[in-house]
Amino acid sequence: MSIGILCALVAGLMWGLVFVTPLLLPDYPAALLSCGRYLAFGLIALPIAWFDRARLRELERSDWIEALKLSAIGNLLYYLCLAAAIQRAGGALPTMIIGTLPVVIAICSNLRDPRERLPWRELLPPLVLIAIGIACVNQVELERLRAEGSLDAGRYLGGALLALAAVACWTWYPIRNADWMRAHPDRHPRSWATAQGLMTLPLAALGYGALGLVSLTPAGSAGLGVAMPFGPEPLRFVLMMLAVGLLASWVGTLCWNAASQRLPTTLLGQLIVFETLAALGYAMLLRGRWPDAATLAGIVLLVAGVLLALRVRPRRGPDGTDADAQPVTPA
């Protein structure tokens, strides 16, 4: 179990990088950032696939279709929504909305699978701590935006809605991915990460090509706001896409797959808080300042919630269901 927790921690550290990328490339549209990141992920997966070709041959047609679904929703659509949200509302609000994922995934997982259900009376305290921690950090960031006079209600609301769409995508992805990993315990997490990269490649290439075609028209070029294929800072863009493609996409997915094979989905969902903490840490480094007291209190509550959640274990009855569940009496 400790290996699974360590893998989830590393995945969170890698995924936290994706929140910084739109801030470092503010002039690039979200669609270009999403397609660029996953085009890099797919290209990086190609040589890895050659070395892992024996395991990849073991995957069936249904497995490749599943990898395609996970790639389309959990990769491209999720990051498109997230990057657009960050560019509209800044890094703070989307980070905090995405930060609700530990609570959302834990609740969804606990409702859907009685075999892995955690006792609600033990699950509730860590969820409350995590929720209060997220609220503390949210409040601080909103006050900062108001003080800076950079709070545009329309763009802020649009960013919030896009962040909620990203939450929906990223709630579906880890639950579905964990289902597949546990249904195929003989599959290596690296092979499944590479398979997702391979299925992402044609989708990202089509998206990138479509953006190139759009840029050929005057209206499309004005809408994109940057020159194709690499925008106003080609070297910086390419290096950033390669970095997030390798670290956030391949390494992060690899570690998350390994964690998914070892941990219950309800617990796994709460460990996504590592991504939120990493994103906050990177944002603080980017701003060059330490968190204030309220933000620090929120971080402490988040960590305390996760540590408390790690102590919760499933309780199964003789029939394999939640031992704490109340029997339903027919009317």
Image (cartoon, helix red, strand yellow):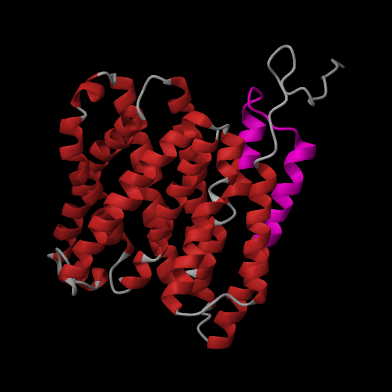
Q: Residue placed at 77% from the left, 39% from the top?
A: 122
Q: Nearest the camera: 241 or 30? A: 241
Above/below status of 206 relative to 115 = below
Picture coordinates of residue 225, whole percent (x, y) = 24, 73
Task: Give x and y (percent) for residue 301.
Answer: 68, 59
Relative placement, left or right, of 248 versus 150 is: left
- In this picture, is 274 found above or below 136? above
Residue 111, located in which quarter of the rendered image? Answer: top right
* Residue 128 appears in the figure: yes
Q: Is residue 185 left or right of residue 116?
A: left
- Tell which residue pokes out farthest to the left in this image: 216
Q: Can you give x and y, in whole percent of width and height, for residue 242 in the image? A: 23, 56
Residue at far front of view: 2
Q: Which residue appears at 15% of the width and 32% of the height? A: 50
Name the magenta segment's main secondary structure: helix
Residue stretch rendered in magenta on the structure: 106-133
